[in-house]
Image (cartoon, rainbow, N blue to C red):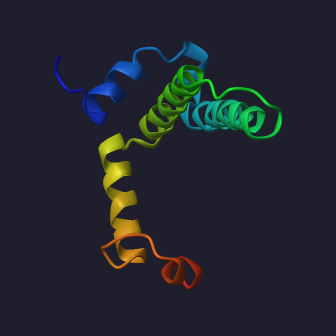
Amino acid sequence: MEKLSFNKYQKEAEKLISEDGRKDMITNGVLGLAGEAGECCDLVKKFKYQGHELDKEKLKDELGDVLWYIAETATGLGISLEEVAEYNLDKLHKRYHGSKFNKEDSINRKE
C-alpha cells in the first residue's frame, strides 16, 4: 500500500466537503474541529474520571475526524497540510532550540 502524504489526504478530503461547508470552509472547519476535539476529550475524560476503558479505536476514529477538519480549514486558507506541519515543526524546533522538549524553554518561551 502506498503511503498517504498530507497533501494527498487533503485533496481527497476536499472532495467530501458539503456544498454548504464549501461556502465558508474556514468557519465550518474550525467549528467542526472544536466539536471533534471535544469528542476526543470526552473519551479521555470518561477513561480518567468515570471508570471507562479507553476505547482506542473510537479515539482513532475521532482523531481522523479532527484531521479532516484541519484539512478543510487549511484548504479554506489556501495552504497545504504539509505547509502547516512544516511551520509547526520549525516553530517548535526554535522554541526548544532544535532538540527536544525541556521545561525551562517551555516556561520561558517567547511567543
Relative depth, front residue between 93 and 9: 93
Position of 45 compared to 36: left or right? right
**Residue 25, picture quadrant:** top right
Relative to residue 106, is residue 37 depicted above or below? above
Residue pictured at 74% horizontal, 40% vertical = 48
Position of 45 compared to 56: left or right? right
Residue pictured at 56% horizontal, 38% vertical = 26
Query: Residue 89: where, in percent of width, then height?
Result: 35, 60
Relative depth, front residue between 102 and 32: 102
**Residue 66, picture quadrant:** top right
Residue pictured at 31% horizontal, 55% vertical = 86
Quadrant the C terminus occupies? bottom right
**Residue extending furthest left?**
2
Query: Residue 99: where, in percent of width, then height?
Result: 31, 73
Residue pictured at 38% horizontal, 50% vertical = 84
Query: Residue 93: where, in percent of width, then height?
Result: 34, 70
